């Protein structure tokens, strides 16, 4: 897979992320922020990330920027530090995809790049533009991660999670130590679980069967109130209830929005419809999938709209200055810790369980899965055929029910007369095909996802 540029930045096989490709993209990005003279650089724990980060630092220095090397830390922690300093940033990460791939996430001084920024970077890369200047400096910033820890300890208050026993599934998350420190300072008793020195690709939106079984076993073995974790670069949360059952990311988003007393919610069309059934939200706006689309819609909100955004993967974007126990400044980039801490805090404050909080929400269930290592051209042709050919679409979906409506906001979302929903979408920058399903029954949502996944796999195998 040749490196591609999309809603999560640049991604590709490590073998194809050559020094030349990385250098050209760094220069392209830097030419789009000519007023910025400082670049923050962070990385995840993939074996290839230190070398790629070193290339970025060297290229940026040579282009005349002062480089702040933040080491291994979560993407939201890097964004918080760079935005506070008014600097641009590049995070070296492939997020949840396997270790044979990696990528770059770009941040302008105001935060995540927009769709317009993406276009400018792509155009500059195509033209092989270069930024030049007197060689800049290189310093390290070990304080970047503690700044992120302080953000949440100050907001929720020391002792906010007193009495809770929380497992931290460490795997190869770059924020594993950070999670443990925040939870400990908030008063929780932390139980470290399954540390790995080998990179493990954890997708919080499509948690595999083995991991789900492990989460349940750990919860029982250690008598936990919850298990918390993240994807590789810590911009997506994973949280279970006391039984080890994973709480979907978009459900965490609803629970977190309630804690913050948000009034406007922006979320992709793939998110659980329960958000539209919650009366406390004055307005819910649905977008295409990808944080740049969510951010673009959030930017249209008025200053007093109390606007937040979240994705089905759980990444949460805070669009206003909130107060919990202490102040919590806006951070409009995907974050993992807020949607972990807010539901735990709410359960503690209400003297109830996470499972009870979830059961009190409007009952609407979703499930998600993916096909990996697909032929992307074949997948695109398959989906185009379903979109453009009514008879083909009716025939493919006939085993799952009678169609009532379709939505083409992002990929193909079909509504059935039964109330079930299926959403198909190929990844924009990875050889993956996503399958989402929604139903009034959790079992039905899971079964429907599995059945549709099997049908899609059969089509892509032809």
Image (cartoon, rainbow, N blue to C red):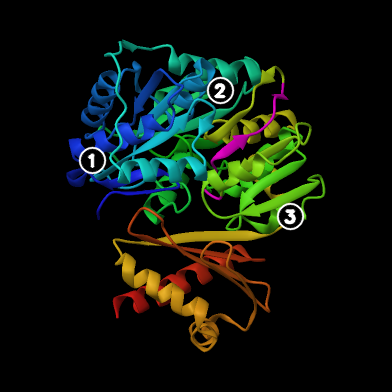
Q: Quadrant of residue 161?
A: top right
Give the extent of the magenta segment: 312-324
Q: Residue at x 36, y 40 (%)?
A: 124
Query: Is 313 covered by the magenta stretch?
Result: yes
211 or 293, nearer to the observer: 293
Q: In the rendered image of this protein, does residue 384 appear above or below residue 339?
A: below
Task: Tell me which numbered mark, 2 or 3, is placed earlier along the sequence.
Answer: 2
Task: Tell me which numbered mark, 1 or 3, is placed earlier along the sequence.
Answer: 1
For label 3, the SS is: helix
Quadrant for the N terminus, please.
Answer: bottom left
| Residue behind mark 3 | 276
Query: How far apart are labels 1 and 2 at the CA level?
Result: 45 Å
Residue 137 visible? The answer is: yes
271 or 331, nearer to the observer: 331
| Residue behind mark 2 | 188
Q: Main secondary structure of the magenta part?
A: loop
Tell me if 258 is positioned left or right of 149 in this view: right
Q: Residue 351: x percent and y percent?
A: 73, 32
221 or 117, nearer to the observer: 117
Query: Is 202 covered by the magenta stretch?
Result: no
Residue 224 visible? The answer is: no
Q: Residue at x 57, y 66 (%)?
A: 445
| Residue behind mark 1 | 21
Q: Residue 57: x percent and y percent?
A: 28, 22
């Amino acid at each position: 897979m040749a490196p591609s540029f999309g809603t999560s930045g640049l991604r590709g096989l490590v073998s194809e992320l050559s020094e030349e490709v990385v250098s050209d993209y760094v220069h392209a990005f830097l030419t789009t922020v000519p007023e910025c003279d400082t670049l923050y650089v962070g990385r995840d724990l993939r074996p290839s990330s230190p070398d790629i980060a070193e290339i970025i630092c060297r290229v940026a220095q040579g282009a005349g920027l002062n480089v702040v090397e933040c080491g291994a830390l979560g993407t939201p922690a890097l964004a918080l530090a760079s935005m506070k300093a008014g600097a641009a940033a590049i995070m070296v990460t492939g997020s949840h995809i396997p270790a044979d791939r990696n990528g770059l996430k770009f941040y302008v001084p105001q935060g995540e790049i927009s769709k317009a920024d993406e276009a400018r970077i792509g155009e500059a890369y195509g033209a092989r533009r270069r930024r030049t200047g007197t060689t800049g400096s290189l310093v390290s910033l070990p304080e970047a991660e503690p700044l992120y820890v302080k953000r949440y300890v100050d907001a929720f208050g020391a002792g906010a999670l007193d009495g809770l026993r929380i497992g931290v599934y460490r795997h190869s998350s770059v924020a594993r130590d950070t999670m443990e420190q925040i939870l400990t300072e908030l008063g929780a008793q932390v139980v470290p679980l399954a540390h790995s020195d080998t990179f493990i690709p954890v997708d919080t939106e499509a948690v595999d069967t083995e991991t789900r079984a492990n989460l349940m076993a750990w919860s029982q073995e250690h008598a936990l109130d919850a298990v918390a974790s993240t994807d590789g670069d810590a911009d997506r949360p994973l949280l279970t209830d006391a039984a080890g059952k994973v709480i979907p990311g978009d459900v965490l988003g609803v629970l977190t929005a309630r804690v913050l007393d948000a009034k406007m919610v922006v979320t992709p069309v793939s998110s659980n419809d329960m958000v539209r059934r919650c009366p406390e939200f004055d307005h819910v706006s649905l977008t295409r999938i990808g944080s740049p689309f969510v951010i673009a819609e959030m930017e249209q909100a008025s200053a007093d709209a109390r606007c937040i955004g979240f994705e089905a993967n759980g990444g949460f974007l805070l669009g206003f200055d909130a107060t919990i126990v202490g102040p919590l400044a806006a951070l409009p980039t995907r974050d993992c810790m807020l949607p972990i801490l807010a539901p735990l805090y709410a359960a503690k404050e209400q003297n109830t369980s996470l499972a009870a909080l979830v059961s009190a929400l409007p009952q609407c269930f979703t499930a998600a899965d993916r096909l990996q290592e697909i032929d992307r051209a074949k997948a695109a042709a398959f989906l185009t055929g379903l979109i453009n050919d009514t008879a083909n679409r009716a025939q493919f979906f006939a085993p799952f029910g009678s169609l009532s409506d379709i939505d083409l906001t992002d990929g193909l979302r079909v509504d059935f007369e039964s109330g079930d929903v299926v959403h198909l979408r190929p990844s924009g920058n990875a050889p993956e095909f996503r399958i989402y399903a929604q139903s009034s029954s959790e079992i039905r949502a899971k079964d429907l996802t599995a059945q549709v996944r099997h049908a899609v796999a059969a089509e892509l195998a032809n």
